[in-house]
Image (cartoon, helix red, strand yellow):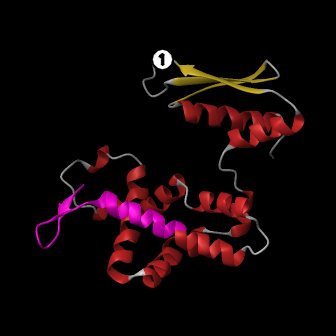
Amino acid sequence: MNTKNDQGVYVNFERLEFLGDSAIGTVVANYLYSELREDDEGELTRMRSKIVSREKLNSIGKELKLLDHLICTGKKELFGDDIYGNLLEALIGAVFIDKGYEQCKKVVFKLIIDPHVSLLDVKKEIISYKSVLIEWGQKEKVVVDFSTDKEESKDADINYYCKLRINEKQLVKVRAVSKKKAEEKAAKRACKIMKIIN
């Protein structure tokens, strides 16, 4: 995805992504620090993670149709969903370089915070059902066990299965495209079965 600037020097978008990621994180951290005066460092960190999650940035980048503006030599349809979040980060990084922090902050508010962040909703949002289930298990003195392995399947997209046991009793078995997704899917289902979440 590298292209040349007006001087014929290659522009590295990954460096802009790095800068944009840091700039978004800083603006969001400052926003949370100002708005949530009663919350401790742990809660502020969790809130920031939810707001700047890969899924959320991908969704915003897709909504903004950033891929339509990408100049590249490869086929755009071959890029995964992460390209949208990467482009959003690169855009914010470019604004920071060209216009400075204050203008960058305005753009982060305009594109991310104002249209997509409700602090009440973010507080309720669950980013990892696996973490919720493990914390519940520790609190209730219950053994939560994820047994995840590769699976030979006719469906090339389904590569992993996960058996989730509570106190050695199998509660659910799910299949997914990756180990992480299989465990998260199993945990979400288990949380609903055990009525840990609504």
Residues in magenta?
1-25
> Residue 190, position in %: x, y?
75, 33
Q: Nearer the viewer, residue 46 or 179?
A: 46
For residue 135, which quarter of the picture?
A: top right
Residue at position x 44%, y 78% from top? 104
> Residue 71, position in %: x, y?
22, 61
Decide whether residue 3 is among the magenta residues. yes
Whether residue 125 is situated above or below residue 31 in the rendered picture: above
Residue at position x 17%, y 69% from top? 5
**Left or right of residue 156, residue 185 in this image:** right
- Residue under pointer 1: 153
The quadrant of the image that shows the N terminus is bottom left
Q: Nearer the viewer, residue 72 or 22?
A: 22
Whether residue 169 is situated above or below residue 185 in the rendered picture: above
**Left or right of residue 160, residue 85 in this image:** left
Whether residue 71 is situated above or below residue 193 in the rendered picture: below
> Residue 115, position in %: x, y?
57, 72
Residue found farthest to the right: 140
Q: Is residue 106 visible?
A: yes
Residue at position x 38%, y 53% from top? 83
For residue 187, which quarter of the picture?
A: top right
Secondary structure category for the residue under label 1: loop
For residue 194, which quarter of the picture?
A: top right
> Residue 182, position in %: x, y?
59, 31
Decide whether residue 126 is among the magenta residues. no
**Left or right of residue 72, residue 102 in this image:** right
Residue at position x 44%, y 80% from top? 101
Q: Nearer the viewer, residue 97 or 123?
A: 97
Tell me the kind of residue under disc 1. Ser
